[in-house]
Image: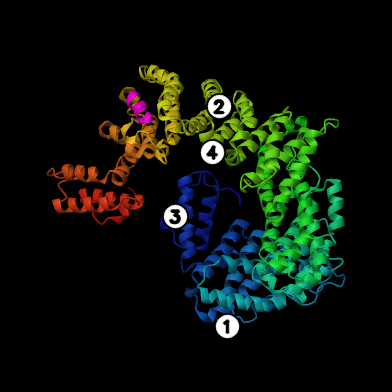
Amino acid sequence: MEPPDSSVQSPDLVSLELTVENVEKALQQLYYDPDMEHKNVAQKWLTQAQTSRQAWQFCWPLLSPDKLPEIQFFGASTLHTKISCHWADLPTDQHQTLRMQLLSHISHFSSGPKMVLTRLCVALASLALHTMPQGWPRAVADMVRVYQPEKVGDQGGSQGGVGGGGGAEEEVNAHAHCLALLELLTVLPEEFQSCRLPQARRAQLREALAGEWTAVCPLLRQLLQRQEGNSQVKERALRCLSSWVGLDVPLHGESEGLLQDCFAALSDPELFDTAVETIVSSISQPDCQRYTDALVNLMPLVLGLHDQLKAAARDGDMETSHGICRIAVALGETHSRTLLEQVEHWQGYLALVNMILFCTGIPGHYPVNETTSSLTLTFWYTLQDDILSFEEDKQVVYLQVYRPVYFQLVDVLLHKAHFPSEQDYTSWSSDDKEQFRIYRVDISDTLMYVYEILGAELLSNLYDRLGRLLMDTERPTAWQDTEALLFGFQAIAETIDVNYSDVIPGLIGLIPRISISNIQLADTVMYTIGSLAEWLADHPMMLGNVLPMVLQGLVKAELSVSSVSTLKRICRECRHDLAPYIHDIMTVSQVSVTIRFTNSQCMWLMQGLGFLLSALPMEEILGSLTTLLTPHIQRLDTLAHQEPSPTAKLSIIHILGMLSSLFTTLDISRQDEGSEGTTPAQARPNPVVVVLQQVFTLIQTILSKWLSDSEVVEAVCGVFERSVKTLLNDFAPMVQQLSEMLGQIYSAFPQASALDLTRQVLFCLNRHCPVLLAQWLKEGLRVPGFPSAQVSMEQKDTFSQQLLREQTNKRRVKEIVKEFSLLCRGMQGTTGYSADY
């Protein structure tokens, strides 16, 4: 469409009547007017035009051959809109005429433009869905008859169908009509899938369309089997099949032959990708499981691709290996149980499993040299899940066959988890490294599933291999081999209870023998130790073998993430057995947290130290807390008296975050359990409360300067919120001070964090101090006009009773308070409003 003369004013569309000329003017304004307001007006006017009754008439002139493609496209789109959304406006006696007009226009536009042809095909598809099966009982068969392509690609030309002529022109017309028919047949199931229909009507149409498959399947076979056929036609035929398989068409009989034709198309490089998509779509339909014989017959076709797969892997042809792998996995994974049950064909399915194993171990590093192996990982889970779902007697048979495959799989997975050489790894992009990290996580999950099949024998296998690597000093080994085996151990120990494994003591003994010369290996050593934290809690005498390595890692910046994570897990699980190491842990932690760690790592470390301190005798906790926190409190004091600045703000939030993290896990409430001859906790000041009381004045000073900063206020509230959750009853000495502080915060600058904390001094009071809360509510609500003159004394009493009854359900407490709040504002029953607050 040519742009209009810029000197011509844009038409006032609001006042224009609906004519072909005005539609064209509006389209010109939409496409070429530089003023966005004018474009929006044109868009709105055109949308209204499409919904008008006149649209049934003005759409046809827009499709005139002399119109520009943009105008023709709008005409075709208008037809689709009218048919799909305003079908009831069209009298029944005009249905036949409309159908013939569409068939004729599709014929005329069969040579293009493609965008117009497609919209016309979608319009006819929508018409067919409105009229099938009563009004147009053989819709698809009629479409095939009108555009019959019997002679497309043959030297004799085409016979019958729409159009005419002779020789080359006839051949061109036949080719175009064939492509138009395939477009029409492709969009018909797609339109069915996308349109909104009542359930009963959808079922009726699905049945009608499935009945039309007998007209589609022979046509597609005819087109795919032509030796001299056009690749474009074959590609469209393959896409058409992909569209129809979503309707659960049967896979037996001629459909099975059609699928075999798709496999034959894999030999054509121009059709390979489309053929893969079609085959995968076809055999991934769960409904295919009804056709067991067809699935069994497909196995030789898939296995016949193995040599092509090997050649592609050898030549580095990632596209081909990727495509063949997708086909093998689609058959093996979607129909795993069905094919396992075909015991007379067990060798065929075993061969398919081994073909997928080859795909898992395809040469090269993921994702730089290959992207195929990741496709197979969920298959191994599905296979083991199906095997273990059989009755025990059948399980025994299947395990005899497939356990050796799973042992091979372990070797393959560990090999694929290998890091490349340091030189190669350095050259990888950050995106490649992240994809490789995720890939290793997927391998880790797969190893967990493998353990379900192989059990303790898998750990023994890994341990024996690691022992041979570390004990054989004469033969040098690559660090990647050691790292991969440790990675395997870690993957299993993270999710499987290994407390009863007889190889873990040996593994703990081997770890100190590892010569760590690489950051990736060092990280994996750390994470492996962390995964064994629960086992170490049951075998504390082994802590001395590994804890020094963790503490050494803490002082190395490059190991900060893994070493902090591991120390936190050890402190959580083994806290009661760490007394001999507490001095070393505290000393190294204090140095590291000051100079080496990021913000999040500091938080993790403080959480770990909270676990550690929780296990100390009461008389030692406060001294250790003082030693740990004094430098940070002194720094906080300095910051509190400085003028606000971005740097000071970050430091204040960081230190308050450290306090929050520490108080989250420093829980001494369990020390009284089973203790004899000790002073009850209620008679002793809680160390956390002592610290909070010491810093409270300092926090008030901070708030006096930062009260309008939501992030600082949120950090302050976080300290007390975490403390309330951990301390419970022990927080009582702080209640009055905290309540006053919250009142000051909210009165000056209402902020969400203050409300969250208030909801938390309220829920905990209700749960742990109901008598006191009842007394306070009675005294507070007795004041006339408080909290609002909108509520009566009876309503206040009802609120108190409802609140005091809910001591465990946070959601219900929130609802009670919300409703009372609305009542106070005279908005009772405005549920839509209350949902936003």
Question: Along the line of sight, which residue is nearer the eye, 474 or 785?
Answer: 474
Asked whether the residues under the numbered discs 3 and 2 touch, taking CB atoms below 8 Å apart as contact, a structural biologist would say no
Q: Which mark is residue 581?
A: 2
> x, y (%) of residue 732?
29, 35
Asked whether the residues under the numbered discs 3 and 1 touch, taking CB atoms below 8 Å apart as contact, a structural biologist would say no
Helix, strand or loop at mark 1: loop
Question: Along the line of sight, which residue is nearer the eye, 409 or 824?
Answer: 409
Q: Which mark is residue 134?
A: 1
> x, y (%) of residue 117?
65, 63
Helix, strand or loop at mark 2: helix
Asked whether the residues under the numbered discs 4 and 3 touch, taking CB atoms below 8 Å apart as contact, a structural biologist would say no
Q: Tell me the distance, in whole angstroms, between the alpha carbons under discs 4 and 2.
A: 14 Å
Q: Which residues are magenta?
A: 686-694
Among the 4 quarters of the image, the one containing residue 561 = top right
Question: To which residue does mark 4 refer?
Answer: 573
Q: Tell me the distance, in whole angstroms, between the alpha carbons under discs 3 and 1.
A: 42 Å
310 vs 74, left or right, is: right
Q: Earlier in the sequence, mark 4 or mark 3?
A: 3
Which mark lies nearer to you, 4 or 2? 2
Q: Tell me the distance, in whole angstroms, between the alpha carbons under discs 4 and 1.
A: 71 Å
Question: Coloring scheme of the render?
Answer: rainbow
- What amino acid is found at the position of numbered circle 2 in the picture? Tyr
Question: To which residue does mark 3 refer?
Answer: 13
- What amino acid is found at the position of numbered circle 3 in the picture? Leu
Is residue 155 in sight in this rendering?
Answer: yes
Q: Tell me the distance, in whole angstroms, between the alpha carbons under discs 2 and 1.
A: 84 Å
Q: Earlier in the sequence, mark 2 or mark 1?
A: 1
Judge whether 299 appears above or below 36 on screen.
below
Please name the residue shown 77% across and 64% down the image.
Answer: 233
